[in-house]
Image (spheres, helix red, strand yellow):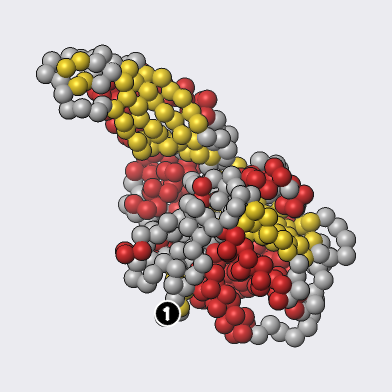
Amino acid sequence: MTGTPIDWNAVEKEAVDLLSRYLQIDTTNPPGNETDGARFLQSQLEKEQIESEVLESRPGRGNVLTKYCGAAGEPEILLLHHIDVVPAEAPKWYHPPFSGRVENGEIWGRGAQDCKFLGIMQLMVFLLLKRRGLEPEKHLVYAATADEEAGGIWGVHWLMEHHPEKLRARSVINEGVGWGFPSRENNLYFCQVAEKGACWMRISFEGRPGHGSLPHGENCLLDMARAVTVLAEHDFPAQINATSRQLIEGLAPEQGLMPPDRFLELLQEGRAHEVLDSIEDDALRGLLVATLQNTAVPTVVQAGGKSNVIPGEGHCEIDCRILPGSDSEKLKQQVHDILTVRGCRNFTITFRGEGLSSESPTDTQLYKAIHDSFLENDPRARVIPYMSPGATDSRFFRDRGIPAYGLQFDLSVEEVQRIHGHNERIGVNQFVLGIKVLYDTIRKCVYS
Ligand SMILES: [Zn+2]
């Protein structure tokens, strides 16, 4: 594994150009139109004589798959990203969201952070290995998929149902979903090793209908309003798992907001909420709350249709995020008990959504390779495992016992807020660092 050194200036120029062009393809989901993005990626692979295939789950919903094969062995690592992006409110962007504009060391566009940048990083690693004639000893799989932003039904989920062999690998590198952190001495890189499960709770209320001119105490709106307030203000018990323990221990010396020992009290039973309340950084506190406990956030309220009619029924919807080790039935019972104690009446609770949480171990060869590669490329790097409150396609793999790791590169709070927000962009330096880290990671894992 020697050869001439890589000309990283040339790699940067090529990678920035590819990302800019990829960002110019509008793959907003809905409707997705991922096939346009898939064909673009395929054309880049074809130029290097790397065979790939585009599989459509529905018309326009393309997924690209290719393998870089070694002489023998099982598929080792799947490099995964999603082609689709969330809608952008174009008038509120400084540069149009599908401009792919490169300016002042940044590449602009919807998907620059979530997560077309990752697709181009992974593609560059494939191309570099091929050009350098490096035949891996283990197979490497590249997959760019549809529909992640709407749950992955027409992307990873569809592929697992219809072409499971094409996603087969011993482990996965995927997107990380953001986390920002305020100033510190070291550069923190969060490696996503776990995520909460998402499911949606509907609480339906019944009351006595009537004329709006005759008030009575059985108006279901009153019970609904109470339920929404109670849930919004409720703190579920903190639960520590392997990932959150490593996260807290990793952050303790870095956070700079309180003495490390005090911060570590987050790990003590019954102490977490008191420590959380004393964290003055809103963004950090919010993210830790989401990491340490189940959450149930009211998002939809519907009842009534006419100003002079007291409605006989109504419902509210609650976005529930469940920790690994918890389950939706348990949360349902907790919510039922909380609302009953607080005086809500005549309600029933139903759930939809899979609520699939997931967690990968950190004592694997791949996690170590990611960790070491960050350190080799940035002496101030500190790699910390973390759990994402939001879901990614990684859950489908972890659910099958395949470790999946999500990468991101030293995002600030502002950068995290641009994911799914306005003016999404990525720094060229951050992007090139990512390619180097990924290249070194793969080298450590598929060559001996
Ligand atoms: Zn994403």
Disc 1 C-beta below 8 A from ligand 1: no
Picture coordinates of residue 376, whole percent (x, y): 64, 72
274 relative position to 179: left or right: left
Which residue reaches farthest right?
72
Residue 265 drawn above or below residue 66: above
Q: Residue at x 75, y 53 (%)?
A: 166
Tally of marks? 1
Position of the N terminus by quadrant: bottom right
Dividing the picture into quarters, in which one does residue 349 lie?
Answer: top left
260 relative position to 21: left or right: left
Picture coordinates of residue 301, whole percent (x, y): 32, 33
Q: Residue at x 25, y 28 (%)?
A: 305
Q: Residue at x 58, y 55 (%)?
A: 60
Looking at the image, which is closer to me, 28 or 116?
Answer: 28
Picture coordinates of residue 186, whole percent (x, y): 49, 67
Residue 46 drawn above or below residue 191: below
Residue 234 shows in the view:
no
Q: Residues within 10 Å of mark 1 (few under 14, many from 20)?
A: few
Position of the C terminus by quadrant: bottom right
Residue 140 drawn above or below residue 207: below
Which residue reaches farthest front?
59
Q: Residue at x 47, y 22 (%)?
A: 333
Picture coordinates of residue 413, whole percent (x, y): 40, 60
* Element class at badge 1: strand
Which residue corresponds to mark 1? 103
332 relative position to 118: left or right: left
Residue 57 shows in the view:
yes
The amino acid beneath tag 1 is: Glu
Dividing the picture into quarters, in which one does residue 306 lie?
Answer: top left
